[in-house]
Image (cartoon, grey):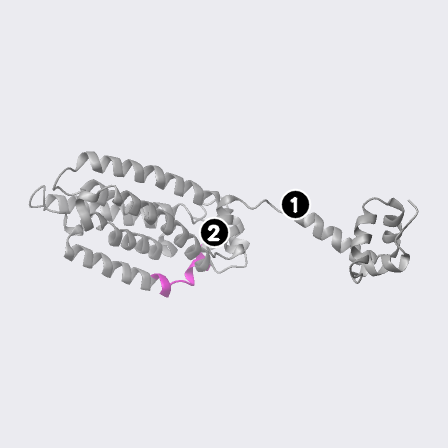
Amino acid sequence: MSWHVPEEDLRAYARGELAAPALWSADAHLGACAACRGVLAEVSDPVALDAGWERLDAELDAPRVGLLESLLVRFGVAGHTARLLAAAPVLRRSWLGAVVVVLLLSVGAGHVAHGGGFPTLFLALAPLLPLAGVALSYGPALDPTYEMAVVAPMHGFRLLMIRTVAVLGVVLGLNGLATLALPAYGLRALAWLLPALALTATGLALTPRLGPVLAPSLAGGAWVGLLVLAQALRAGPDVPLAPFTVAGQGVAALVAALAAGLLFLFRDRFDLFQGRAV
């Protein structure tokens, strides 16, 4: 090879100051000339060179962005938040479980309730899905990334809200799709929504005091007990249970609002809870 990059050009190349078209020629030549690469190594700043290698190692060692993380970023979620959600496998398990349960519920409700009846089975169980999904996404007993969350420079309440919104978005969306499988019932098939929000907010509000397992368990147990009582007081098979009447929906909305207020009021307690083994 008769031509080599002049040393002055190599020095400018190392400093990032070499302009085109000399830069293009140097790039093409350095790829095939070991002698010029050796000169470039000699004239380069060793500190900047080491920093460059460290950046390259970091890029090579960085985990590949998955489909879930890419979709979250595309929908406007910040990169660090998308990584936080995608890195928690418990979220994916809760979402997968919700998919299976919702499909089973929609099929079961379609076979159990016919004609002008009421989709009681679907409405009774659908509010428990968001509650269970949120419970599976937070806390030392169920979250395998809990230790990482404890040492992360993030407010415990903010972490909880990020995961809660993610789970609610998926589970409520799936419940909504399952509702579309019950077109004969019209708006009555949406009577699960307010109870679901009330149960989830209540479970979260109780979590700092009772823990991430007992709190949603008590909320779910109270819901089941309420349904049993409503069934005992039911006037007839075609009459909706009390929680799914207009009055019952109003009570559910009030409970959801009160629980959300308490959750916000006690938000600082999640930092204390986060460091406490349950």
Can you tell which quarter of the image residue 123 is in?
Answer: top left
Q: Is residue 190 left or right of residue 7?
A: left
Q: Is residue 236 left or right of residue 141?
A: left
**Which of the marked residues, 2 or 1, is nearer the chain's N terminus?**
1
Start and end of the magenta stretch?
Answer: 263-273
- Magenta stretch: dominant SS? helix
Q: Who is closer to the viewer here, 225 or 66?
A: 66
Q: Is residue 188 magenta?
A: no
**Circle 2: element type:** helix
Q: Is residue 171 left or right of residue 112?
A: right
Determine crowd level at label 1: few under 14, some 14-19, many 20+ residues with C-alpha closer than 10 A.
few
Residue at (25%, 52%) from the top-left corner? Answer: 195
Q: Who is closer to the viewer here, 191 or 260?
A: 191
Q: Residue 246 placed where, x, y %? A: 15, 56
Toward the left, the furthest residue is: 235
Q: Who is closer to the viewer here, 89 or 59?
A: 59
Amino acid beneath label 1: Asp
The CA span between labels 2 and 1 is 22 Å
The answer to whether residue 265 shows anywhere in this view is yes
Q: Is residue 271 magenta?
A: yes
Amino acid beneath label 2: Leu
For residue 72, the mark is 2
Residue at (17%, 45%) from the top-left corner? Answer: 185
Q: Which residue is mark 1?
A: 61
**Circle 1: element type:** helix
Residue at (27%, 55%) from the top-left corner? Answer: 198
